[in-house]
Image: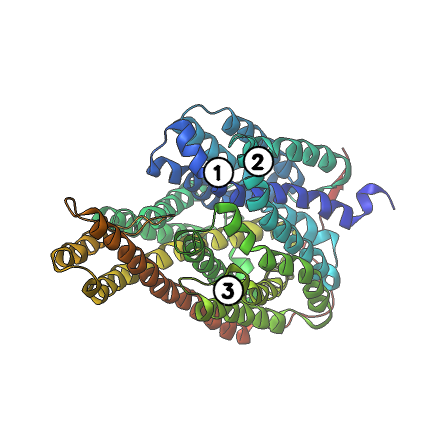
Amino acid sequence: MSRRDNPFAALSVLSLGLFMTLLDVTIVNVAIPQLVDSLNASIDEALWVLNAYVLVLGVCLITAGRLGDIFGPRNVFLAGTALFTLASAACGISNSPAALIAARAVQGVGAALLTPQPLAIVLPLFPPEKRGSAFAVNGVVAGVAAVAGPTLGGFIVTHWDWRGIFFVNLPFGVLSIALTLWIVPDLRPGRRHRLDMAGVLVSTLALTAITYALIEGQRYDWDARIIGLLAGGAVLLATFVWMQRRRQTGGREPLVPFALFKDRNYGLILAVAAAVHLGMAGLFLPFTIYLQSVLGLSALQAGLVYVPFSLTSMVFSPVSGRLTDRIGGKYILMTGLTLFAAGMLALVAIAGVSTSRWVFVPGMILGGLGVSGIFVPMITMAMGQVPPPLAGAASGLLNTTRQLGGAIGGALVGAVLQNRLAASLHDEAIARAGELPAQARSGFVHGFDKAASGGLEVGAGQTGATPPAGLPEEIAQRVAAVAREVFDFAFVSAMRWSLIVPAAIMLAAAGACFALRQPPRTRPEPAAEPEAVTA
């Protein structure tokens, strides 16, 4: 068997590029404090170092998937990897927040170009009865990246500099390009495709408006501008659907072929994928704040809390893949969603103001076990019946839905957390004000109400209120200690609600899986087999 005839060798090489993009998502969070100090960046600028990547990635995925159908998925994968690698170097040499944000946006374009292509390449390389095992490689890669991101990032930031988290992508990118050219076959559709430029324009505008509004909504308190963006994005999205419907016939190729939805599983899996990423945003956002703000862990220590989660997912994803190949993915997916929700609810039950981080290990293992049973059957059932000429479009739409689900999850959980934290701070402040001298009580409660109405910023040492000026030192210290208690208990109470909401959504997604159909065990004949083009 030659190197180009070995599908698992090709899959391993493609996974290297995906590993690079996944690593970049988790590794940057650890470096934000040092990055802010080095570049004199504001909080908003620091957030956009993260959000610029997420925004551009989510907006470009549909178009990138279709580009793979037109120019060949290997070619687009190589272009995306090269662009991502060059943008990483630009991030590393940035000397201003604006330059770094711009480079991160270009990174997002590169990540969008390469992300849909592995599924499009793998689909014709593996028969249906082996695709579960193939897609399990993605679960292993995601688990390794999730473990490596916080730990490697913490090591680099501690012993070198924040710029190192971007330079670490360069050897991965160069190696990925070289191995892709050497091992991965150049698969092309049996007929030439055309790009729907009008669809590209309208979908880009619609997704930009919606994603930007979801990212920035909480910061602007969901004011008229944000609502207007959401409404405008919804109108553009409806216009895009109408345009796509008109292009389904007459030989005019749409950006999103509606033929994908002839398979009921594909449409259902899109909804499940959005729910999954909503649920994951619901876990990681408030719980990470809790680990650092309430328990006082460092960024590296907080990242290590998730190691049992990631390792469990990484170890059991291949098992999930083999089971999916043998019995189908429907019930494995349902079980995975249920276990993930159970893991989140276990964390809700355990979390307290002085909980040891080791107590979270069982809940993390349960959640990781659930995740190992989600992504492999989800991808297998979504892509299993897709004709190879439409694989790029199908993969792009699936990944776009996942990104939007994460953005919606962040916005929803952020809103729940903010609302419940404001109410809990008020209640806790009133309940504990009696522990203070009379002259400090009214100002104490008012301080927390003012902090809540002005928008809370949570971080290590943050309490939401400061002692009034002019108090004697002894009383001021007592006020600060009680304020710390108020914040800790209020945040734990608010976090429980913000975890229960996504857990309920995950359980609803598990129920929706009853409508999935187990795919046939024989491989259908594709409409047009891809052709391998030798270099």
State which quadrant residue 165 falls in.
Answer: top right
Label 3: element kind = helix
- The x, y position of residue 105, in whole percent, is 46, 35
- Reading the image, the residue beneath label 2 is 156
The circle drawn on residue 341 is none
- Reading the image, the residue beneath label 3 is 272
- The x, y position of residue 76, in whole percent, is 61, 37
C-alpha separation, residue under disc 3 versus residue under disc 2: 36 Å
Looking at the picture, does residue 26 appear above or below residue 372?
above
Label 1: element kind = helix
Going 20% across and 62% down the picture, which residue do you hit?
433
Mark 3 Cα shell of 10 Å, populated few (<14), some (14-19), many (≥20): many
Find out whether the residues at labels 1 and 2 contact each other: C-beta distance under 8 Å. yes
Q: Nearer the viewer, residue 368 or 293?
A: 293
Find out whether the residues at labels 3 and 2 contact each other: C-beta distance under 8 Å. no
Amino acid type, residue under disc 2 in the picture: Ile
State which quadrant residue 170 falls in.
Answer: top right
